[in-house]
Amino acid sequence: MTIDTQSLKAFFESQLPPGLEMLRQMVSINSFTLNRDGVNRLGKLTAHCFTPLGFQPEYVPSSNPDLGNHLVLTRPGRSNKSLAMVSHLDTVFPPEEEIANNFHWQVEGDHIFGPGTLDIKSGTVMMWLVLTALRAKAPQLFEDVTWKLFWNSSEECLSPDFEHVVRNRLPARTTAMLVFEAENRQGPNRLMVAARKGRITWKVTVNGRGAHAGGNLKHGASAVTQLANLVQRIEGMTDFAKQLTFNVGRVSGGTVLNRVPHEAVAEGEFRAFSPAICDEAKAQLLGLAGKGDVRSRADGYPCEVSVEITSESRPWPRNSATDRLLTLWANSGRELGTSVLAEDRGGLSDGNSFWDLVPTLDGLGPWGDNDHCSERSPDGSKLPEFVEISSFVPKAMLNTISILKLLS
Ligand SMILES: [Zn+2]
């Protein structure tokens, strides 16, 4: 079905003020991942915003009792068609940080600054705008489709249970999974997310042999020296040609200064787009385990190296199902006179968990910048997270027209 773009534009312009009021209320609730009560309050408010559209809420407790409830909203349809949308409730800003940096809802020209304005409360408002338009402009289709909306309570810390919450509730043959993280821009081009790197975190522990640094140095096997060698080797595993990056994020080791250190630990992560390259890199990292090359100069006692994989978020590689969605969005963009391109992003989202289950596209949110930053410097060289007001209507049009094409 087709829709008159002029009347759709006018519709969104009329719905933007209530949408922005909704955003203001959402931003005024601190929903830092570890602020369980705040996340739960935002979940309630979000459910309340979608009630007039006919959605029923389900609050699903996180497997980690310190985290808030995931939110699932459902509107059953008359046909067996269904579409899923994904956002999250949490932000990366603790309440004390918001206060310390005077970081709150602040409208300046075309920008709205504030915690979560971009990541990702404006994405939630975008979902509301699109569904409101579909109900008004394509009521038949709106009634026919089963709409499943999912909010992760703790996306920013990659809680592993959300994947199961979604998988257990996703209707069979769901047409697509649309993730409402912010879009990116490259000149006049809108960038939607068609792939994301996987992220594997690891911990390397070295056990050496302690010894008196003054009287018996030769007897020692220095865990710190061994770890230093390993850090160099791990950093050296980065291969930009394979889009594989290793980062040693934290090191510690030793105790007092007159002891040859007996233990040292490094922790870090690596990322890649390709599952095969991730597997290869993991094998290479695990291959560092065993006897080290740093040994006691008295008797050859070697340092012992152990390697642990501490978490795994699998990659979302470029794939034909995502590319088909992208083509659809790009075609709608052409009709609207904007260019839509794909971006392969290094950061993770919930899309990483679902692309192999259902065709997934990410980046459906509006545009803004400086996400995850709360600071502002007097000279303006450091600005906090903001969303651009004028990016809502064009993106809502793009999303709505694309969803109509997808479901018709
Ligand atoms: Zn996000």
Image (cartoon, rainbow, N blue to C red):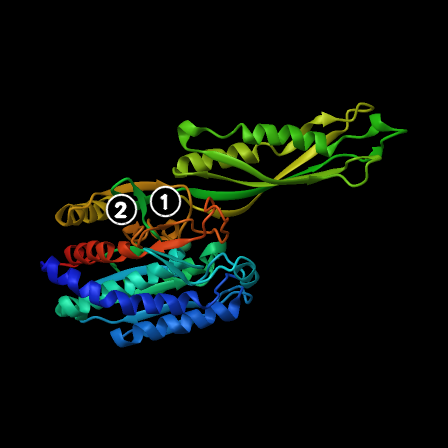
Decide: is 250 above or below 64. above
Q: Amino acid at mark 2?
A: Thr
Q: Is residue 47 visible?
A: yes
Front-lying residue, 185 or 233: 185
The answer to whether the residues at label 2 and label 1 have Cβ atoms under 8 Å apart is: yes
Residue 243: where, in percent of width, then height? Answer: 41, 33
Quadrant in which residue 230 is drawn: top right
Mark 2 residue element: helix
Q: Badge 1, how many Cα within 10 Å: few under 14, some, many 20+?
A: many
First in sequence: mark 2 vs mark 1? 1
Q: Which residue is mark 2?
A: 322
Mark 1 residue element: loop
Q: Is residue 71 visible?
A: no
Q: Which mark is residue 316?
A: 1
Q: Residue at x 26, y 71 (%)?
A: 75
Decide: is 162 above or below 201. below
Q: Amino acid at mark 1?
A: Trp
Q: Which mark is residue 161?
A: none
Q: Residue at x 25, y 42 (%)?
A: 188
Residue 325: where, in percent of width, then height? Answer: 22, 48
Residue 352: where, in percent of width, then height? Answer: 38, 49
Q: Quadrant of ligand 1?
A: bottom left
Front-lying residue, 391 or 406: 391
Give the side of residue 131 with respect to residue 245, left or right.
left
Confirm if mark 1 falls within 8 A of ligand 1.
no
Residue 164: where, in percent of width, then height? Answer: 41, 60
Q: Residue at x 67, y 33 (%)?
A: 227
